[in-house]
Amino acid sequence: MILLRHGQSEFNLHFTATRRDPGIKDPKLTPLGQYQAERAAEALAAEGITRIIASPYTRALQTAAPLARLLNLPVLVQPQVRERYAFTCDIGSPRTELSLQWPELDWAHLEEVWWPAVEEPADQVEARARLFRDEMAVLEDWNSTVVVSHWGFILSMTGESVANGQWLRCDPTGLAPDSVDWRHR
């Protein structure tokens, strides 16, 4: 499968400049982030993608949208691939709000408040990634799936740190990383 990190968000822009949490809940993509999403869609269009899974955060949904339009595929919203809850940006938007913004997506399986209430320990994110890896490994078409996710989840899946708008391949039938270094950020 291909793990695609969302494009640059308003949070990423400010956090990178100051190294402080700017207090932006469920941030949207910046113009650069939208550009990164469009470029990723163009680059991934020839990969034989048959499934797009995305985190419910706005930045991930906005990143998935150009690829979904280009390939005429639905986006499957999956809270399991969300970011580690550690900053204000990891406070999501309620399901009812998201369903108004993206009425074409299926929201029935999502709780109204789907993100954790308190900071999520790293080992919980890693366990969530292992569970997702196991679920994907049993699917016959995992290799034609794009998962639009986040830095911490992708790090937990692969042990690798990726920048906004970048992607990497992940074989869920292979070994999970032995350890994850959370200091990459």
Image: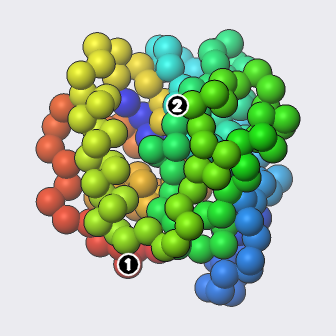
Task: Identify the image quadrant of residue 26.
Answer: bottom right
Vertical relation: 113 (above or below) 86: above
Nearer the observer, 35 or 101: 101
Badge 2 marks a residue whose secondary structure is: strand
> Residue 86: x and y, percent?
52, 73
> Which residue is disc 1 drawn over?
183
> Residue 5: x and y, percent?
53, 49
Residue furthest out toward the front: 112
Task: Indicate the quadrant containing the N terminus: top left, top right, bottom left or bottom right.
Answer: top left
Which of the labelled discs sits on residue 53, or is there none?
2
Badge 1 marks a residue whose secondary structure is: helix
Residue type of the residue flagged with mark 1: Arg
The structure residue drawn at horizontal position 71% and vertical position 42%, both measured from the top left corner, is 95
Task: Identify the image quadrant of residue 61.
Answer: top right
Task: Identify the image quadrant of residue 63.
Answer: top right
> Residue 19: x and y, percent?
62, 85
Asked whether residue 38 is in view, the answer is: yes
The residue carrying pointer 2 sits among few (fewer than 14), some (14 to 19) or many (20 or more) residues within 10 Å by Cα, namely many
Nearer the observer, 169 or 174: 174
Residue type of the residue flagged with mark 2: Ile
The structure residue drawn at horizontal position 74% and vertical position 65%, both measured from the top left corner, is 25
Asked whether residue 7 is in view, the answer is: no
Judge left or right: residue 13 versus residue 51: right
N-terminal-most mark, 2 or 1: 2
Judge left or right: residue 94 versus residue 31: left
The structure residue drawn at horizontal position 67% and vertical position 56%, both measured from the top left corner, is 92
Nearer the observer, 24 or 7: 24
The residue carrying pointer 1 sits among few (fewer than 14), some (14 to 19) or many (20 or more) residues within 10 Å by Cα, namely few
> Residue 132: x and y, percent?
33, 39
Which of the labelled discs sits on residue 35, or is there none?
none
Judge left or right: residue 67 versus residue 152: right
Q: Can you tell which of label 2 and label 1 is closer to the viewer?
A: 2
